[in-house]
């Protein structure tokens, strides 16, 4: 049977939240995507069976040691294994790397990273790693105008992660700028957070889009981060984004010092009636992180990996040269 008549079979493994979202997002004729929950014992046998017959195994989360999933992939002699480094996995891997717990077979797999800085962190551990955009956002039909009231928005998925997400920096700046309203959104049900009087803490919400429309500045002072959905969403809404890392359309503000300077500067522009939407950020997000662009980019790369004899398109190009 001709290759084009057979579906490309992809096994998704790793962070459950993303693995569950991926099949619906990637749905394309000719492709089959499967994910088996690692928390269910009844899923282990079908997962192993599908791992044996799939064309490519994709792990959302990287590592330098083998672990159960990669151990089984090696046992089954799977050639096409891609690891996607997405955030704190680089911190955990660095500890294993420093301790000398690096598996050569794992190092030789294909490694992608969700942001340029994560790719640098992975390469610093001696692995070949490519930055492959895999974060997508729904692009608004139009950029909402800047709100009449100036405010700053931040995201925090749990009150236990204040330091990781740099919310302590935000609190410090909020105390210095009592005339400005700050919103922190995302903590878990039942959690609470002591905050300055001008900071409102919100729980989980179905969508941050209503907040973006009423926000002037989105601040992401995380001490370590991947390519955050929320930052890209804020960019797509034309908001001014302050981030720990340099990124097109954003301003670097990793701590309270830079955060205060930038928020004060933007607030002054607002008071003077000169703070416009961040059109460059919105256009950059739309051009590079819309669902269709990300979907087609991932599938095209997977297809090249599957159809290359060595499983590594770059290696095949190199070896084919005279």
Image: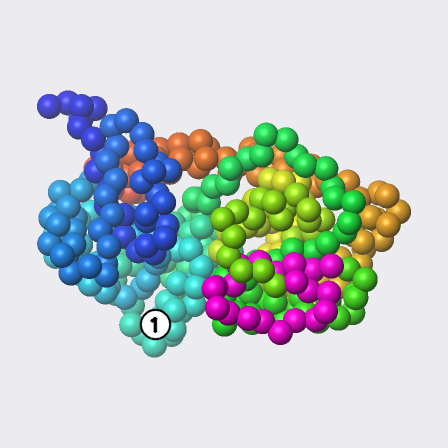
Is residue 240 covered in magenta?
no
* Vertical relation: 43 (above or below) 233: below
Q: In the picture, which quadrant includes the C terminus?
A: top left
x, y (%) of residue 228?
51, 52
Choose between 114 and 271: the one closer to the eye: 271
Among the 4 quarters of the image, the one containing residue 146: top right
x, y (%) of residue 286?
56, 34
**Residue appearing at x 70%, y 71% in the figure:** 196
Looking at the image, residue 312 sits to the left or right of residue 68; the answer is right
**Residue appearing at x 44%, y 31% in the figure:** 292
x, y (%) of residue 86?
42, 55
* Vertical relation: 50 (above or below) 306: below
Magenta residues span 181-200
Looking at the image, residue 57 sits to the left or right of residue 62; the answer is left
Q: Secondary structure at mark 1?
A: helix
Looking at the image, residue 31 sits to the left or right of residue 271; the answer is left
Which residue was labeled with disc 1? Answer: 96
**Residue appearing at x 78%, y 45% in the figure:** 148
Mark yes or no: residue 238 visible: yes
Among the 4 quarters of the image, the one containing residue 264: bottom right
């Amino acid at each position: 049977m001709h290759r084009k008549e057979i579906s490309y079979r992809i096994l998704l493994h790793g962070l459950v939240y993303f693995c569950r979202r991926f099949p619906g997002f990637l749905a394309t004729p000719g492709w089959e995507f499967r994910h088996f929950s690692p928390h269910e014992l009844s899923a282990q046998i079908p997962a192993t069976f599908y791992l044996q017959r799939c064309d490519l195994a994709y792990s959302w989360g990287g590592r330098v040691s083998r672990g159960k999933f990669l151990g089984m992939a090696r046992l089954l002699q799977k050639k096409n294994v891609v690891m996607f480094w997405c955030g704190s996995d680089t911190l955990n891997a660095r500890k294993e790397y420093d301790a000398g717990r690096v598996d050569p077979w794992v190092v030789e797999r294909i490694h992608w990273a969700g942001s340029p800085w994560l790719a640098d962190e992975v390469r610093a551990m001696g692995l070949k790693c490519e930055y492959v955009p895999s974060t997508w956002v729904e692009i608004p039909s139009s950029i909402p105008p800047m709100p009449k009231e100036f405010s700053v928005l931040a995201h925090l998925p749990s009150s236990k992660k204040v330091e990781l997400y740099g919310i302590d920096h935000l609190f410090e700046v909020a105390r210095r700028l009592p005339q400005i309203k700050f919103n922190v959104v995302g903590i878990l049900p039942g959690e609470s957070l002591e905050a300055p009087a001008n900071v409102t803490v919100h729980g989980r919400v179905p969508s941050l889009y209503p907040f973006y429309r009423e926000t002037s500045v989105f601040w992401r002072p995380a001490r370590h981060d991947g390519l955050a959905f929320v930052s890209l969403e804020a960019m797509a809404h034309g908001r001014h984004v302050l981030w720990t890392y340099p990124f097109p359309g954003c301003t670097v503000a990793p701590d309270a010092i830079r955060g205060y300077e930038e928020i004060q500067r933007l607030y002054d522009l607002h008071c003077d009636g000169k703070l416009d939407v961040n059109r460059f950020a919105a256009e950059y997000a739309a051009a590079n992180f819309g669902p269709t662009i990300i979907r087609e980019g991932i599938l095209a790369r997977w297809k090249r990996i599957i159809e290359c004899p060595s499983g590594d398109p770059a290696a095949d190009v190199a070896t084919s040269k005279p």
